[in-house]
């Protein structure tokens, strides 16, 4: 079953360093929504694989295949 995409709930930026394979991302205060998807994009040219896990009402975890000095943007969208 495919869910309907709702409103954008959170947007932001994440900076990582070469020493990090995971990074906790906390949402700023606002509406609490527990059912969402995260879309991410690197803001630098990189070949590192990245993916979100541990989606909670407070935020999520960014996972990296290897450490990298980079910035990522994210968009969290409510799934209805």
Image: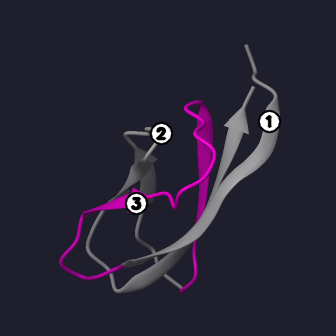
Nearer-N-terminus badge (2/3): 3
Q: Is residue 4 above or below residue 18?
A: above
Q: Which residue is mark 3?
A: 25
Q: How many marks?
A: 3
Q: Marks 2 and 1, Cα distance to the nearest angstrom? A: 17 Å
Q: Which residue is mark 2?
A: 57
Magenta range is: 16-44
Find residue 34 and report its horizontal and vertical position in percent: 55, 32
The magenta stretch spans residue 42: yes
Residue at 43% of width from left, 38% of height from top?
56
Contact, mark 2 vs mark 3 (Cβ under 8 Å): no
Nearer-N-terminus badge (3/1): 1
Find residue 46 and report its horizontal and vertical position in percent: 47, 80
Q: Is residue 3 above or below residue 45?
A: above
Q: Marks 2 and 3, Cα distance to the nearest angstrom? A: 11 Å
Left or right for 61, reference 18: right
Q: Which residue is mark 1?
A: 5
Q: Is residue 63 above or below residue 16?
A: above
Q: Nearer the viewer, mark 2 or mark 1?
A: 2
Q: Secondary structure at mark 3?
A: strand
Find residue 33 and report its horizontal and vertical position in percent: 60, 36
């Amino acid at each position: 079953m495919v869910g309907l995409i709702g409103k954008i709930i959170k947007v932001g930026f994440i900076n990582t360093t070469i020493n990090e394979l995971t990074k906790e991302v906390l949402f700023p205060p606002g509406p609490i929504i527990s059912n969402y998807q995260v879309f991410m994009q690197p803001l630098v040219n990189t070949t590192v694989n990245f993916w979100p896990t541990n989606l909670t009402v407070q935020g999520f975890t960014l996972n990296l295949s290897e450490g990298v000095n980079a910035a990522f943007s994210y968009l969290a969208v409510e799934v209805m």
